[in-house]
Image: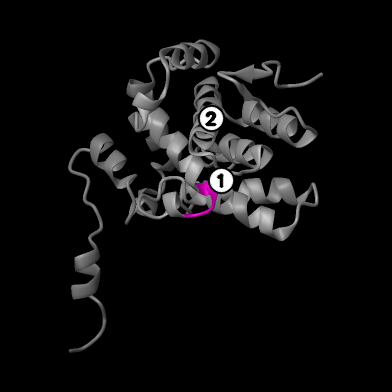
Amino acid sequence: MSVNKVKSIAGIIIPDSTIANHATELLREHGTEFIYNHSLRVFIFSSLNGERKQFKYDPELLYVSSIFHDLGLTPHYSSPDKRFEVDGANAAREFLTSYGLPKDQLQLVWDTIALHTTIGVAEYKEPEVALMYSGVGLDVMGEGYENLSDANREEIITAFPRNDFKKKIIPTFFGGFEHKTETTFGNIKADVCAYMIPNFHRKNFCDCILHSPWKE
């Protein structure tokens, strides 16, 4: 039986292939209902943005990327020393390799996941990368909220509820990398550490320059 019982939401067809269903099974097994709902909303928001912008993209690869994009926050996929985005990207690449996908598609999915929080870069890459970046931005920060119709908002949230998303997402992020806060250096997740840890001391790029071992 198909894992994805919902065929379409807001006019977006939910992929129902073997790869898509297997990916969904992994998310249900290792993730949480909260991450599941977020991931599905990200896919739908990304796809709606793709339609609005008339992008040509691979729905199945975008779906798998959406499913894996936050799995690096979970204990099963989290490494001791890599950014959670990289952990999710590595997991997706390993998963898709087992299905014999070509290297260019593996790299595309890897980039889509690894760069989904990289402001100022992801939006200028391939459609799948740019679209998922936009879908994450819409769900997490409301970027592009005005482009959604009231009917689409209602249908999406009914299918995949937010469930106090604003209150829960920051602790959810933090729970995925509190054992490796150094991986937030140079990226926006350092803001999460600063919010969650009293007197959190951020690593500073300028300090790295000024205290390098070079003798001037």
Between discs 2 and 1, the one toward the N terminus: 2
Residue drawn at point x = 82 percent, y = 18 percent: 1
Seen from the viewer's position, the closer of residues 13 and 96 is 13
The one nearer the camera, 79 or 32, is: 32
Q: Tag 1: residue type?
A: Glu
Q: Position of residue 182 (x, y in %)?
A: 35, 54
Per the rendered image, the range of residues in magenta is 125-129
Comparing 142 with 146, the one in front is 146
Residue at 78% from the left image edge and 48% from the top image edge:
98
Q: Give the quarter of the image for residue 209.
A: bottom left
Vertically, is 50 above or below 7?
A: below
State the quadrant of the C terminus. Answer: bottom left
Estimate how packed mark 2 is, as few (under 14), some (14 to 19) or many (20 or more) residues with alpha carbons within 10 Å: many
Which amino acid is tagged 2? Ser
Residue at 51% over, 51% down: 114
Q: Is residue 198 magenta?
A: no
Residue 101 percent location from the top left of the image? 76, 52
- Tell me the tag on residue 128: 1
For numbered disc 2, what is the local secondary structure?
A: helix
Q: Main secondary structure of the magenta part?
A: helix
Check disc 2 and report the residue beneath it: 39
Task: Write the residue at 61% across / 43% down.
Answer: 57
Residue 87 visible from this viewpoint: no
